[in-house]
Image (cartoon, rainbow, N blue to C red):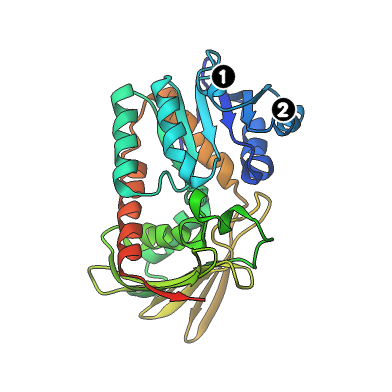
Amino acid sequence: MTSYQPAQRLRFGVIGCADIAWRRTLPAMETDPAIDVVAIASRDGDRARTFTDRFGGTPYAGYQAVAEHEDVDAVYIPLPLMLHAEWIERCLDAGKHVLVEKPMSDGYKESARLLDLARERGLVLLENYMFLYHSQHAAVRKLLADGAIGDLRGFHSAFTIPPKPPGDIRYQADVGGGAFLDFGGYPIRAAQHLLGRDLSVEGAVFRRDRALDVVMSGSVLLASPEGVPAQLTFGMEHSYQNSYALSGSTGRLTVDWAFTLPETHRPVLRIERQDHREEVVLAADHQFAGAIRAFVEAVVTKAPLREEHDGTLEQAALIEQVQRVARNVWI
């Protein structure tokens, strides 16, 4: 990342008072010298006020006021999935740059249309897969390139959580709930990041709740053109895990905390070979701050986000392929 010193602070509005905004994204924005949070909207005016009491800005009951706010340059959208496309489009039409929580939309065609619209408007649209901005993954790539585990032979990744309370949004099919779109995207994106984007779908199994009609958990098998398999597990009926491991011809590299690291945590990469065990302790990094910085830099420098946009679309295509081939086991 290059350093940025904008002549004028980027004025952010927030549409949606989600837990991720409260715990992680807005605290990162609050400490960024290039950002002012000037407006926060919720369907519930009291909830919006709770957020502005902590993070500043004007509270609004209803989203349209922020989308059209003349003092807002960019909008952060942490809404439920099925509301993403509508509010991305409204904000782009109003001339706002958009940072949206993952996934950008519920399908490839819709994400492609929104990215095209952003380009036509000369605006930045970025999907917030924040883990990609943590420096530990660049360190993993370097170790692989340096031959730390030989030639790559396999990839395993898991993102699983314990069951959520009844009524949690992930159990609501009509707003994009379910484990696959919420958690399954992380191991898929990690596989793309480390194995390359030209991956094929070889199989998948979904455990789907009969009463709720949402995917509770599952497994996916991808493969690279060279025949390197990626075995991925996701779900919300497990013990907590978010990790990945790479197997090579001479060793194995493990990342125990892959996707949701706190900014104070120093990652540990474990390398095992037949006669060698090594732990590489890395510096702490703030992946939410990194994602926000990338967004602001793109706005300030007007730099195209081709790699990020290609990753969004290629992942969306993979997700649709997985959904088409998955065998549903009803529970």
Residue extending farthest to the front is 211
Residue extending farthest to the bottom is 274
Quadrant position of residue 147: bottom left
Q: Which amino acid does label 1 sit on?
A: Arg
**Which residue is denoted by mark 2 in the rendering?**
52
Sequence order check, earlier mark of 2 and 1: 1
In the figure, 173 relative to 201: above or below? Answer: above
Q: What residue type is labelled 2?
A: Thr
Mark 2 surroundings: few (<14), some (14-19) or many (≥20) residues within 10 A: some
Q: Where is residue 318 in the image (x, y as percent from the top left)?
A: 32, 59
**Which residue is denoted by mark 1 in the rendering?**
9
In the figure, 99 relative to 192: above or below? Answer: above
In the figure, 165 relative to 132: above or below? Answer: below
**Label 2 element class:** helix
User: Foreground: 179 or 139?
Assistant: 179
Please give left or right for residue 26 compared with residue 172 in the image: right
Q: Residue at x 55, y 55 (%)?
A: 172
Q: Where is residue 85 in the image (x, y as percent from the top left)?
A: 42, 38
Q: Position of residue 16 (x, y in %)?
A: 60, 36
Distance from Cα at disc 2 to Cα at disc 1: 18 Å
Quadrant position of residue 37: top right
Q: Residue at x 47, y 50 (%)?
A: 132
Q: Which residue is drawn at 29% across and 45% down?
A: 109
In the rendered structure, are the residues bearing label 2 and label 1 in contact, judged by CB atoms less than 8 Å apart?
no
**Label 1 element class:** loop
Please give left or right for residue 134 compared with residue 123 in the image: right
Q: Which mark is residue 95?
A: none
Mark 1 surroundings: few (<14), some (14-19) or many (≥20) residues within 10 A: some
Q: Where is residue 245 in the image (x, y as percent from the top left)?
A: 47, 72
Q: Residue at x 47, y 86 (%)?
A: 274
For marks 2 and 1, give the one nearer the viewer: 2
Residue extending farthest to the top is 70
